[in-house]
Amino acid sequence: MRVCDAYILISIGFGPEDVTLPNNPLRLKSIHHVKFVVGNAKQAAYYYRKAFGFSQFAYSGLETGSRHLASYAMEQGKARFVLATPYRTNSPEAAHLHTHGDGIVDIAFHVEDADAAYHAAVERGAEPALHPTTLNDEYGSVRHSAIKTYGDTIHSFYSFRDYTGPFLPGYVAREVPGEDVGILRVDHMVGNVELGKMDVWADWYSKVLGFARYISFDDKDISTEYSALMSIVMSDNSYAIKFPLNEPAAGKRKSQIDEYLDFYNGPGVQHVALLTQDIEQTVTRLRDNGVEFLSVPDSYYDLLPQRVGQIDEALDMIRSLRILVDRDEEGYLLQLFSRPVEDRPTVFYEIIQRKGSRGFGKGNFRALFEAIEREQALRGNL
């Protein structure tokens, strides 16, 4: 597999959950990284340091012997971002960037055995993307393989045998500190697929990866006067790896999923949810750093106490930061969604704090959809 035009790799550690569990046919351990293709890695690395508080910890480029990519590895908490840009434009990766703009191209897993995971996935119906291969440098070797999933997205498998390098073969340690905003790890990632394909890909995740349907929402759950979507959340049996899948539903106007599919030119990952243990601190710092978030009207907060009951956080703070709150039978959660971080209205981020709830904010769907529709209307895409 060639490396994409530019990448953000988000590597997620799950601590004690990073173990091989029963009913896990590919022997997945955790999400190892997520790759974004971006247009300018040096500028993107600066943005993620200054806006999201990530610190650079490793680098690969001309000075280290890489003749095709410059790569900047970033981390905060257990989340790792690596941004890479090719030196040449006449490559399939450049074509990917031209087609999709900045976006996720690979959700990669740390596995027990990359060869065994690959062969098991193909036997269970996956289409190959990269046959097992060895990556080497002076720190040791890593086995790597990959399969195709929705759109132009792939899942890579990485297995390690006493590898001692700072990230992956080809990287050297190079530290540039950022100011931590309290991000702990990635909570979940949401994929948008075409109308009629949500169940197809949910079944694929069940058959190929051994995931189960954690929860589902139909157009009655996620709708406004103008637009709607349907969603199924797929999860591994540890609930550490969660992939909601969205498809558009019929409505009077174009939904956020339709807009994404139009501007991304096909299916892809819509947003990444970043977990924090103090959403007030994290959102305040992100806003101070220039990150832009969606806003909901005051009427949402007028009804909040009777809808969610008692919470630990001050309602004045929740209102001032425009944070959304939802409660289920296990507890409650607090969440806030950024505006798209690219010029195309595609990829955005969610900041989420969980106070017992393992849900996805069902009670906030209408308010969130209406906020997104206001943004779509400003862009002329509703």
Image (cartoon, grey):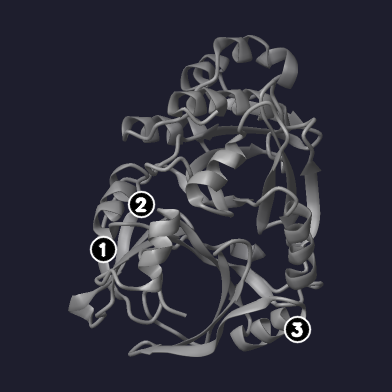
Find the distance from the CA under tag 3 to the CA under tag 2.
39 Å
Find the distance from the CA under tag 3 to the CA under tag 1.
42 Å
Instruction: Establish if 66 lies above or below 257.
Output: below
**Which residue was labeled with disc 1?**
175
**Is label 2 in a helix, a strand or a loop?**
loop
Q: Where is residue 199 in the image (x, y as percent from the top left)?
A: 78, 55
Label 1 or label 2, whichever comes before in sequence order? 2
**Is label 3 in a helix, a strand or a loop?**
helix
**Which residue was labeled with disc 3?**
123
Label 3 or label 1, whichever comes before in sequence order? 3
Residue type, mark 3 in image: Glu
Q: Nearer the viewer, mark 3 or mark 1?
A: 3
Direction from residue 178 to residue 246 in the image, left or right: right
**Is label 1 in a helix, a strand or a loop?**
strand
Instruction: Establish if 127 lies above or below 96.
Output: below
Question: Could you say which is closer to the camera, residue 315 or residue 377?
Answer: 377
The residue that appears at 62% across and 88% down in the rendered structure is 115
